[in-house]
């Protein structure tokens, strides 16, 4: 890949997105490129300023809270900007990556394209549109064992999370697992109550 590019690595949990990001970044380091690695502050799965794949690979990273802060961390001589967990950033991430590309940077990012409800996650739809290269990884389904898992299954106390659960819940293998479309489950307690004629309380008024 030349400069002025945005490579987006996407797929469900446990498909190897961060591992692939680290692989590409380490090749850049071997090629003596100036690399800057960025990670969202909200991702607290690591205890320090670094990103880590599930197989134990890791690399120092700068943690930021807001997307716009990325620009202040990037220096003119930085050639490669790697950004992990893009789905956690606010909507300005699209403008930030566009600006970095226009400045001649090679941007490599990872992100969950779908949330636990199998709906587009954050700014990922827009990022998929502006990406110059998209790598879509699959995982092993943790229920049937097939190699076509594309969904992220959230588990609470070992059971599929209800549709009404909060969107952001940072976890690991104990709270999320990859599943194929056939094995993916999304219970909807509110829908079940409506089917049985139970009146839902409206607390919005």
Image (cartoon, rainbow, N blue to C red):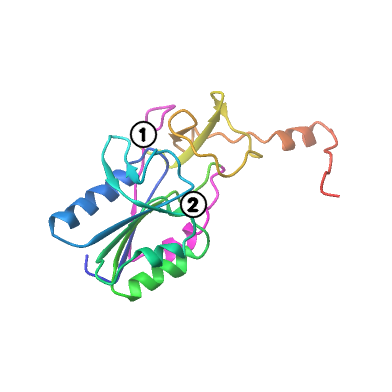
* Residue 149: x %, y % from top left: 41, 38
Q: Farthest residue in the left direction?
A: 31
| Marks 2 and 1, the one that precedes in the sequence | 2
Res. 85 mark: none
The residue at which mark 1 appears reads as: 140
Instruction: Name which residue lies at 42% across and 27% down.
Output: 144
**Residue 137 shows in the view:** yes
Left or right of 117 on screen, residue 128: left
Left or right of 39 on screen, residue 193: right
Local secondary structure at mark 2: helix
Q: Quadrant of residue 186?
A: top right
- The answer to whether residue 138 is magenta is yes
The residue at which mark 2 appears reads as: 88
CA separation in Å, label 2 and label 1? 24 Å
* Residue 110: x %, y % from top left: 37, 52
* Residue 51: x %, y % from top left: 34, 45
Question: On screen, 154 above or below 19?
Answer: above
Which secondary structure type mostly characterizes the magenta part of the structure?
loop
Q: Farthest residue in the bottom direction?
A: 102
The region drawn magenta spans 117-146
Instruction: Name which residue lies at 39% across and 38% down.
Output: 47
Instruction: Name which residue lies at 37% across and 28% down.
Output: 145
């Amino acid at each position: 890949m030349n400069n002025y590019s945005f490579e987006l690595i996407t797929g469900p949990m446990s498909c190897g997105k961060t591992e692939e990001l680290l692989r590409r970044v380490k090749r850049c380091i071997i090629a003596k490129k100036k690399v800057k690695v960025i990670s969202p502050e909200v991702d607290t799965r690591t205890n320090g300023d670094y990103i880590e794949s599930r197989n134990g690979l890791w690399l120092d990273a700068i943690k930021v809270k807001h997307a716009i802060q990325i620009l202040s961390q990037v220096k003119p001589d930085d050639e490669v900007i790697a950004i992990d967990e893009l789905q956690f950033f606010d909507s300005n991430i699209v403008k930030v990556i566009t600006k970095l590309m226009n400045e001649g940077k090679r941007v490599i990012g990872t992100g969950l394209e779908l949330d636990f409800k199998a709906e587009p996650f954050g700014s990922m739809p827009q990022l998929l549109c502006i990406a110059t290269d998209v790598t879509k990884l699959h995982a092993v389904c943790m229920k049937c064992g097939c190699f076509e898992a594309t969904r992220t299954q959230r588990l609470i106390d070992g059971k599929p999370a209800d549709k009404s659960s909060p969107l952001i819940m940072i976890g690991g293998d104990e709270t999320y697992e990859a599943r194929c479309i056939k094995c993916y489950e999304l219970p909807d307690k509110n829908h079940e109550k409506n089917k049985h004629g139970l009146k839902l309380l409206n607390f919005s008024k």
